[in-house]
Amino acid sequence: MTFIDGKALAQKTKETLKIRVQTLKEKGITPGLAVILVGENPASQAYVRGKESDAKSLGFISIIDRVDESISQEELLKKVEQYNQDKNIHGLLVQLPLPKHINEKSITLAIDPKKDVDGFHPVNMGHLFLGNPLMIPCTPFGIMRMFEEYAIDLEGKEAIVIGRSNIVGKPMATLLTMANATVTIAHSRTTDLPSITKRADILVVTIGQSEKITKEYVKNGAVVIDVGMNRSESGKLVGDVKTCDVAEIASFLTPVPGGVGPMTRAMLMEQTVLAAERSTGENLV
């Protein structure tokens, strides 16, 4: 069994990005990433610190716009439009979740699709589902890069995605389909889930339940991608897969932490660079 080292692959990705950033800087363009952080959610603050660290290490213009939780939806929309109009900012995201009085859908719709480096805007989702991706949700994008790096063949394979969210499950299924896998989406209400998942050559787990998936759910020799990030009762960070159990029969497995998470952030950086490249109008990608 091989653990897929997301941390090492993320570092490799960033080394490649540094070369692309240098090429842009030689043309007078520095990639710019702006993150709007509303309130003081500890998890959100930790995520944003990681993004800021990555951006600075790559030589980006990095703006973290921290605003009070009491900000009105109208004021937040004005901030989004400010960065939409800023030619020095190529990537823009509003860190989720947002306070209950703010409509997340309205905020997502307000972001310029060309700057939507999270890949959540309906315009970008539409391009993805039509087979012409421009900006891709970063977690599925990172997982596809893992398959590529580890030479995991998807052609004709049976792939099961457990989870149907708009930011992971659905786009993951679309990308696997584009890679010629035969794809099924399962979820928390699927009847007799183990009978479905045990068919999978490729199993992507994003169900949001701590260590839910044991070897009883997994086909011998399957590739298992664990997207989960949960805290156990003891406070330990664990995934949706019971690693020690599934490692006995899987051929490849992503650890938690150090698997999917680092690649999600790396893909955010890559899409910021891509947006900066596209801003030159030279059709570099």
Image (spheres, rainbow, N blue to C red):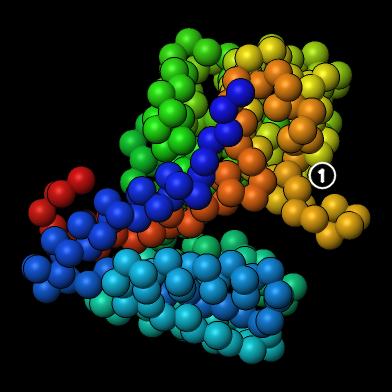
Name the residue at 29% across, 72% down. 59
Location of mark 1 (residue): 210
Where is residue 51 drawn, in percent x and y?
A: 48, 67
Give residue 215's quadrant in the image. top right
Tell me the quarter of the image containing the N terminus: top right
Query: In the rendered view, would you say 196 is above or below 281?
Result: above
Q: Residues within 10 Å of mark 1 (few under 14, many from 20)?
A: some
Query: In the rendered view, would you say 196 is above or below 267?
Result: above
Tell me the quarter of the image containing the C terminus: top left
Where is residue 96 drawn, in percent x and y?
A: 62, 66
Which secondary structure, mark 1? loop
Name the residue at 15% across, 69% down. 25
Is residue 123 visible from the viewing direction of this image? no
Query: In the rendered view, would you say 98 is above or below 141?
Result: below
In front of the other: 148 or 179? 148
In front of the other: 227 or 249? 249
Where is residue 220 drawn, in percent x and y?
A: 69, 12
Query: In the rendered view, would you say 97 is above or below 195?
Result: below
Q: How many marks?
A: 1
Name the residue at 83% across, 36% down. 212
Is residue 228 visible from the viewing direction of this image? yes
In front of the other: 165 or 108? 165
Does 158 sit left or right of 236 as displayed? left
Does 86 sit left or right of 159 as displayed? left
In front of the other: 37 or 16? 16
Where is residue 115 drawn, in percent x and y?
A: 36, 63
Amino acid type at image mark 1 = Ser
Name the residue at 36% across, 69% down. 57
